Image (cartoon, rainbow, N blue to C red):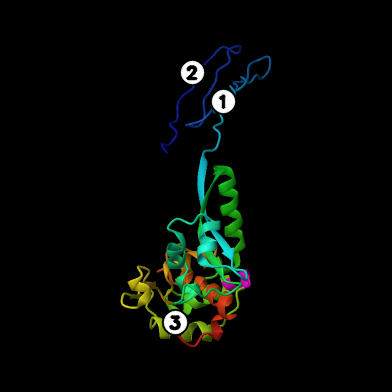
């Protein structure tokens, strides 16, 4: 910002009033010159208000899930929810939850049967984002090391907020078996890979499982170490009670 120059004020008649503009980039401040009969200040001009613009609509996408009940079959569920591709695609999207036999589905299983779109205003989206950020503030406020120890500890803090069970030892044991601690690990040879959904990340989740059990506030990238651990532990809790109960391929 340029410095103010010093100027000599010319002599004026005592009844003459002058106005000095102070500051830059804003409304001028009127400074009176005192005359013989008193001081008078010019009234500042009120700045025009910018027109208000309605917030734009922001598209939102969420997963549609279904809890299996006694007597259900994949064909019946796919027909009920108009699943694109029928029971075959329904099975492919939920293979990690169902297992190798599509004819056997247990009551209580949580299946992803599709997605849904919704429209919300930018104001609502901002409020939702702020609410989500507030929900994970205790974990986000901490500093974590960018290594396996830090990833596990950050995941445990998020899990604690979401009520997802699991311990450091349980996570570490399964990570070392599944990926040897490599967050970019990907299995390109097993049955999941053959079906087009290779296992990814520290705890080797396939995309449908990661999407179904993703925890709000974490990245949507399955290779993100914290997101991968948290989603996998959420899945393990739903299927086995806790990641601590997992001692082999899951």
Q: Is residue 63 above or below residue 222?
A: above
Q: CA distance from mark 2 to mark 3?
A: 82 Å
What residue is shown with label 2?
A: 10
Q: Main secondary structure of the magenta part?
A: helix
Question: Mark 3 vs mark 1: which is more N-terminal?
Answer: 1
- Residue 58 is left or right of residue 196, and the answer is right
Q: Which residues are magenta?
A: 159-163
The disc at residue 240 is: none
The disc at residue 175 is: 3
Q: Nearer the viewer, residue 182 or 243?
A: 243
SS category of the residue bearing label 2:
loop
What residue is shown with label 1?
A: 47
Q: Residues within 10 Å of mark 1 (few under 14, many from 20)?
A: few
Q: Residues within 10 Å of mark 3 (few under 14, many from 20)?
A: many
The image position of residue 182, as x and y in percent, is 37, 78
Name the mark nearer the viewer: 3 or 1. Answer: 3
Question: Mark 1 vs mark 2: which is more N-terminal?
Answer: 2
Task: Say whether residue 144 is visible.
Answer: no
């Amino acid at each position: 910002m340029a410095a103010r120059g010093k100027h000599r004020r010319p002599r004026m008649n005592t009844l003459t009033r002058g106005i000095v503009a102070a500051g830059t980039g804003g409304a001028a401040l009127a400074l009176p010159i005192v005359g013989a009969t008193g001081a008078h200040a010019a009234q500042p001009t009120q700045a025009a208000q910018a027109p208000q613009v309605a917030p734009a609509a922001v598209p939102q996408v969420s997963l549609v899930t279904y809890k299996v009940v006694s007597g259900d079959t994949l064909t019946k569920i796919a027909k009920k929810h108009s699943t694109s591709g029928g029971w075959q695609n329904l099975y492919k999207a939920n293979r990690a939850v169902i297992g190798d036999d599509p004819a056997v589905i247990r009551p209580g299983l949580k299946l992803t049967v599709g997605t849904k779109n919704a429209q919300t205003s930018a104001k609502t989206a901002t409020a939702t984002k702020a609410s989500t950020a507030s929900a994970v503030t205790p974990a986000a406020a901490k500093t974590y090391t960018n290594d396996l120890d830090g990833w596990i500890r950050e995941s445990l803090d998020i899990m604690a907020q979401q009520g997802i069970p699991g311990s450091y030892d349980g996570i570490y044991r399964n990570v070392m078996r599944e990926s040897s601690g490599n967050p970019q690990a990907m299995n390109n040879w097993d049955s999941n890979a053959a079906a087009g959904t290779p296992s990814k990340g520290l705890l080797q989740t396939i995309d449908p499982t990661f999407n179904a059990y993703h925890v709000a506030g974490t990245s949507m990238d399955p290779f993100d170490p914290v997101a991968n651990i948290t989603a996998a532990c959420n899945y393990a809790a739903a299927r086995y009670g806790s990641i601590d109960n997992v001692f082999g391929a899951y």
